[in-house]
Image (cartoon, grey):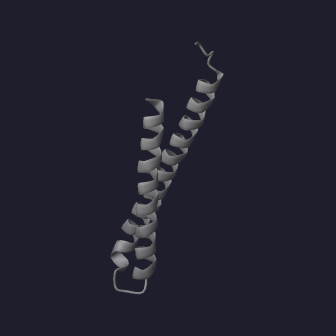
Amino acid sequence: MRSGLAAGLMGVGGIFVTFGAVVVVIEWFSRHNDWRLQLHAMTSLGLGSIVIGGVMFVAGYLLSRIGRDSESSAPRTA
């Protein structure tokens, strides 16, 4: 159960980080156009997605590491 949750967190976190990176690239290219009114919203959305995705990815990674350590330290029965 824990490995599924960790994989889910890492997967969704990776999607958010990728989405945020795409928004930041689009925002960077739109600085040269007439979209000045949307730049603040695009910057906030892009950086927010990167931060939230990074936190979710790190939480999933740490959860998988904790799960791996607790499974290997558990007493083995035949």
Residue lying furthest top: 77
Measuring 46% from the left and 58% from the top, which residue is drawn there? 17
**Residue 65, quarter of picture:** top right
Measuring 45% from the left and 74% from the top, which residue is drawn there? 25
Left or right: where does residue 38 sit relative to residue 56?
Answer: left
Residue lying furthest front: 78
Tell me: residue 1, above or below residue 40.
above
Where residue 58 sits in the image (x, y, percent)?
Answer: 55, 45
Tell me: residue 67, above or below residue 17.
above
Tell me: residue 48, above or below residue 38.
above
Front residue of 24/9: it is 9
Measuring 39% from the left and 73% from the top, which residue is drawn there? 39
Tell me: residue 29, above or below residue 70.
below
The quadrant of the rendering that contains the N terminus is top left
Measuring 60% from the left and 25% from the top, which residue is drawn there? 70
Front residue of 42/6: it is 6
Where residue 6 sits in the image (x, y, percent)?
Answer: 48, 38
Where residue 27 sits in the image (x, y, percent)?
Answer: 42, 74
**Residue 49, quarter of picture:** bottom left
Where residue 3 sits in the image (x, y, percent)?
Answer: 48, 35
Front residue of 12/49: it is 12
